[in-house]
Each structure stands twice: as C-alpha cells, then as structure tokens.
Amino acid sequence: MARPLTLWIAIADGEHARIAQPDGDNRLRIIRSLDSASAHLRSHDIGTDRPGRSFESANAAHHAVGERHDPHRLEKDRFAHLVGEQLNEAAAHDEFDELLLVAPPHAMQELREVLNDRAKKLLVGALEKDLVKTPDHELWPHVRDWVSPVRRAAG
C-alpha cells in the first residue's frame, strides 16, 4: 500500500516563516519555524541606507554615489532566500511530496526565484496572502481547498 502524500504548507513573509503539515483530523501541525535575526531591528541598526559620498577634484562639490538601498528590504530578500534554500534542501531529502507556498506578493516572488527545479516540481500551488501573523488554529479555512484531494489532483 502506498503511503499518503506529504503536503508542506510554507507560510512566509520577509521576516517570519513556518511550515505546516495537515494531520489526519484536518488540523495543521507546525513542523518548523524560522525568524529573521533582523525582524525587529530598525534600519539604522541593520546598516546605513544612505549611498556613499564622493567629491570632485575640480571643486568642493559632494555627490551621492550609487543608488539608495533599504536595509530592511535587503534583509527581507535574504530571509526569503534562506527559506527557499531550506525548502530546496527538504525537497532533496524527500521530506515532502507536495508544496504550497503562502506569502505576500513580494515574498512570493523571491521564494519562487530561489526554488530549484526539484522543489518547483513539487509545488502544487501559491496563495498570495500574508498569513504569517494568523494564529495556527485560524489557518485551516485559508488553506483547506489546497488540502482537498480533488483540488490537489486538478491543480
């Protein structure tokens, strides 16, 4: 007899992530949690968001060099890469058979870019919602359609 498919639901944003797995009585069990080290830091605590300065030798004028970067945005992108790499590693070790990504649009884009071919083949859906702060016991209504065998077979 074949074992049932293992569905992982990766719920993430730029600072927090958790992996849920449906159990037999239609509840989600959190099996992993990740938090960005910079989640609660202010921009100036992460680094400067000002471009470097330069000056001309012909006069005393100073000019900004390079474009301005938001340290929080860069940290959120790095965190999405970390989450994607962990999903890639779990896929390589056959820890799940199907994957549902749940993330707001920007984080979803970053996560999809990081997933390798193996993890992408296991991707059954993507739900562009920010559910990171949704309590565990309130997640089911948002994802139950993806857990349904009919939807998974059609998806």
Image (cartoon, grey):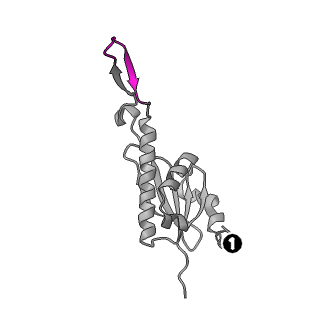
Res 63 → quadrant: top left
Residue type indicated by callout 1 = Val
User: Does the rendering let one see residue 133?
Assistant: no
Q: Would you name the residue on which mark 1 appears?
A: 150
Q: From the viewer's perspective, is residue 68 above or below residue 105?
A: above
* Occupied quadrant, residue 89: bottom left
Whether the magenta-drawn stretch holds residue 135 is answered as no
- Tell me the SS state at disc 1: helix
| Label total for image | 1
* Residue shown at the point (34%, 17%) measured from the top left: 56
User: Which residue sits furthest left?
Assistant: 57
Left or right relative to 29: residue 142? right
Residue at the (54%, 54%) spot, across then down: 135
* Quadrant including the C terminus: bottom right
User: Residue drawn 59% across and 57% down?
Assistant: 138
Q: Main secondary structure of the magenta part?
A: loop
What's drawn in magenta, residue-wise? 56-66
Query: Where residue 30 sits in the image (x, y, percent)?
Result: 48, 63
141, above or below 106, in the image: below
Q: Is residue 120 depicted above or below 129 in this figure?
A: below
- Is residue 60 covered in magenta? yes
Residue 105 location (% of width, % of height): 58, 47
Front in this rendered view, residue 123 or 24: 123
Q: Quadrant of the N terminus?
A: bottom right
